Image (cartoon, rainbow, N blue to C red):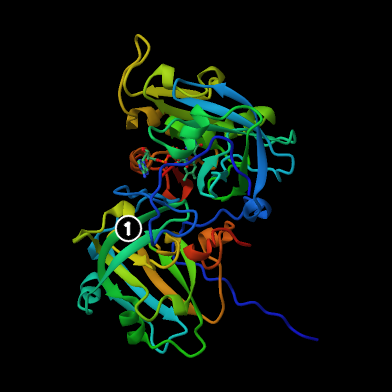
Amino acid sequence: MTEISSPPAFTPPTRFAIPGRIAVTHQGASVWQTATLTEIRRETPRAATFRFAVPAWVGHVPGQHLQLRLTAEDGYTAQRHYSLASAPDDSGHIELTLDHVEGGEVSGWFHSEARPGDRVEVRGPVSGFFAWPGDRPALLIGAGSGVVPLMSMVRHHRARGLDVPLRLLVSARSPQELIYAREYGPETTAVFTRSAPAGMPVGRMTAAHLEPLLAEQPPGGWEAYVCGSNAFAEHATRLLVAAGQPVDRIRVERFG
Amino acid sequence: MNVTRGFTGRPRVHRPGLPPGQYDAGDDWPVLSAEVTPDLAPADWTFRVDGLVEEDRTWTWEQAHALPGSVYEGDIHCVTSWSKFGVRFGGVSVDAFLDAVRPLPSATHAVAYSHTGYTTNLPLADLTGGKAWIAFTYDGRPLAPEHGGPARLLVPHLYFWKSAKWIAGLRLLDHDEPGFWEQNGYHARGNPWEEQRYSGD
Ligand SMILES: Cc1cc2nc3c(=O)[nH]c(=O)nc-3n(C[C@H](O)[C@H](O)[C@H](O)COP(=O)(O)OP(=O)(O)OC[C@H]3O[C@@H](n4cnc5c(N)ncnc54)[C@H](O)[C@@H]3O)c2cc1C
């Protein structure tokens, strides 16, 4: 009889770790597959949602992203990461929402060239760290296109009729630039930084926005998910930490 | 080859030193980390090397700075596709720390870990021979917290997720043990020239 013993894994003397409870598949992470664009929906003057047929998509957990690759005729490729906007379903379709980045190579192609029938390559889903399977109360905080992976969570929550508490705090420059504006329900509070509807304050997210949400701590506390530009992520995580949210219960997805 | 209709890409001059699938980020230095940027003062920073070594050792900020300084000038490459040319980091060669603890012959790999608890694995050979640093400065100034300050690991020949920010220690092992991103599907080694992005690449 042989005894197989594997040495115990090394755990550093700190609290931050991959959540063991979130089981994600990495099956799709190394295989490129063709995604066929089936629909383009305008969300705001700067952002649009792109729906793709990906028949062999292995499924994802809300919050995960994928890698997308465009190839030019001379073989040159550009690859970028995009969060999955759609909730997991078995329709063989996924949706991405892209901001039109000024001078952007990949988002520029999507916003000025892409049309239904076009094919791109994707692989994934990748990374399970920012994923939310819907099992814990979640406090979602996003700005700009940072709301994309959070919307996947909100949609998942609705599609499954989950009753675990979920709150979304979303920041946009103006109501016109608020992605998914028509879809928000009572779980969402919007913050506008440049212009707001009459009677609503204009300005950055502050501790005062977080206070009421952190005051209604659900049993077990919130799992916080912060997503957006690095500047926003730094700002929002600082507010959370100052308000008493434990650092190991804050997950951050930075768009770079 | 799966050509994307109408995609030409940005006008490009071939840039020697740019690994496949990467683009030149120019002056940008994107920040990508999954955790909250820690509030870590140099006085509270320590760096430990243990595991398969003759003698464990922990350095304070002062003690680490007493070691001979060493500079890296060159390029860095992030798995999210950007590369940054001609960067300049100042710090101490990882060799200087390893020489002090004397790795055992059985040590083949290391887990680098951060003050946040982030981990990443490396073959020991990727940390020795002048290939890796504990970096304290960028462009002559203290390393910014969001880029890993006060101190980060720097392994510029591998994708940048290997260069653990807020480095706290290295544990030497006789086997390879996947770290944070590696458990999340990323490649065990991460060589940009071979495009080792995800496990299976
Ligand atoms: C995990 C993750 C998830 C993400 N999810 C989303 C998402 O859901 N939605 C979304 O919209 N974005 C998302 N992003 C950001 C996305 O990956 C891209 O960075 C973004 O779409 C911009 O790519 P681009 O090719 O359009 O722009 P790039 O070509 O990369 O350009 C970015 C900026 O740099 C300038 N620039 C760079 N190189 C040059 C050059 N050589 N010459 C001139 N200008 C240059 C451009 O003008 C532009 O301002 C995510 C990022 C990450 C890391």
Relative side of B181 to A52, left or right:
left
Label 1 crowd bin: few (<14), some (14–19), many (20+), radius 10 Å: some
Q: How many marks?
A: 1
Q: In this view, which residue lies farthest toward the right?
A: A1
Q: Give amino acid for label 1.
A: Phe
Q: Is residue A147 visible?
A: no
Find disc 1 in the rendering and name its residue: B85
**Residue farthest toward the top in the current orientation of the protein:** A198
Residue closest to the eye, B154 or B117: B154
Residue displayed at 40% across by 64% down = B163
Q: Quadrant of residue B74?
A: bottom left
In screen coordinates, is A237 left or right of A3? left
Regarding residue B121, the answer to whether it shows in the image is yes
Q: Residue at x 67, y 79 (%)?
A: A5
From the top left corner, tell me how far across and down residue A64 is, in percent: 57, 44
Q: Where's residue B158, x and y in %?
A: 44, 66
Task: Say left or right for B131 vs B150.
Answer: right
Front in this rendered view, residue B45 or B5 = B5
| Chain of the residue under label 1 | B
In the image shown, does B11 or B62 lie closer to the viewer?
A: B11
Q: Residue furthest front?
A: A74
Image quadrant in which the N terminus of chain A is located: bottom right
Tell me the quadrant of ligand 1.
top left
